Image (cartoon, rainbow, N blue to C red):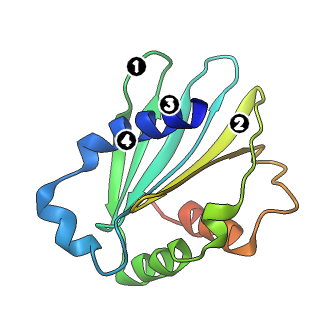
Amino acid sequence: MKQFLIVALAALLSLPFASCSTVDSCTANGNYRIDYYSGGGFTGMQQGVTVSCEGWAKFWKKMPSSNRVITDSVKLSSDQLKKLDSLMASPDIFSYSNKVSGNYTTYLVLMKDIQFNNISFNNSDPPADMPASMIELITEIKNINKE
């Protein structure tokens, strides 16, 4: 039941980013979306980035009991997009599981076609068993620069 609620919530959150006109640009490498964010602490604020297969990275902030507010967006280069496409093709990123709940937690939510994975971890001390492809994906996301 808990996984169903997580998938339902992820589907609802992805609706604003869905569009019939962009489906063709994602068909070659699969329709995917990556959410990478951290949150918690005293304020409960979350801050992160959403990367879509259309080639956009949208930076956002979210306070508790409110919607995400996009603070910036950047068009990814073709090299960045190719790298993300290849990393999202790795089966390791959908088979790896890690759930950590703490005062300040980092989340990596991956959706590709019908595949879904929600990983949480302490960003300052990532799990030792995290697959290399996932570490590389996180590194690539962190290297996306706001312009």
Q: How many residues crowd mark 3 within 10 Å: few (<14), some (14–19), many (20+)?
A: few
Q: Decide which of 111, 144 is in the foreground and name it.
A: 111
Q: Amino acid at mark 3?
A: Leu
| SS assignment at label 1 | loop
Q: Between disc 4 and disc 3, whose residue precedes?
A: 3
Whether label 1 touches label 4, CB < 8 Å: no
Q: CA distance from mark 4 to mark 3?
A: 10 Å
Q: Amino acid at mark 4?
A: Ala
Compared with 17, 67 (above or below) is above
Residue located beneath label 1 in the image: 66
Tell me the quarter of the picture where residue 68 sits.
top left
Q: How many residues crowd mark 4 within 10 Å: few (<14), some (14–19), many (20+)?
A: few
Classify the position of the C terminus by image quarter. Answer: bottom left
Image coords of residue 42 (percent x, y)? 69, 17
The residue mark sitting in front, 3 or 1, is 3
Compared with 60, 128 (above or below) is below
The residue mark sitting in front, 4 or 3, is 3
Q: CA distance from mark 2 to mark 3?
A: 20 Å
Q: Amino acid at mark 2?
A: Thr
Q: Between disc 4 and disc 2, whose residue precedes?
A: 4
Q: Between disc 1 and disc 4, whose residue precedes?
A: 4
Residue located beneath label 3 in the image: 5
Q: CA distance from mark 1 to mark 2?
A: 19 Å
Q: CA distance from mark 3 to mark 1?
A: 19 Å
Residue 11's label in the rendered image is 4
Residue found at the very far left of the displayed protein: 21
**Seen in the image, is 138 located left or right of residue 80?**
right
Q: CA distance from mark 4 to mark 2?
A: 22 Å
Residue located beneath label 2 in the image: 105
The residue mark sitting in front, 2 or 3, is 3
Classify the position of the N terminus by image quarter. Answer: top right
Image coords of residue 66 (percent x, y)? 40, 19
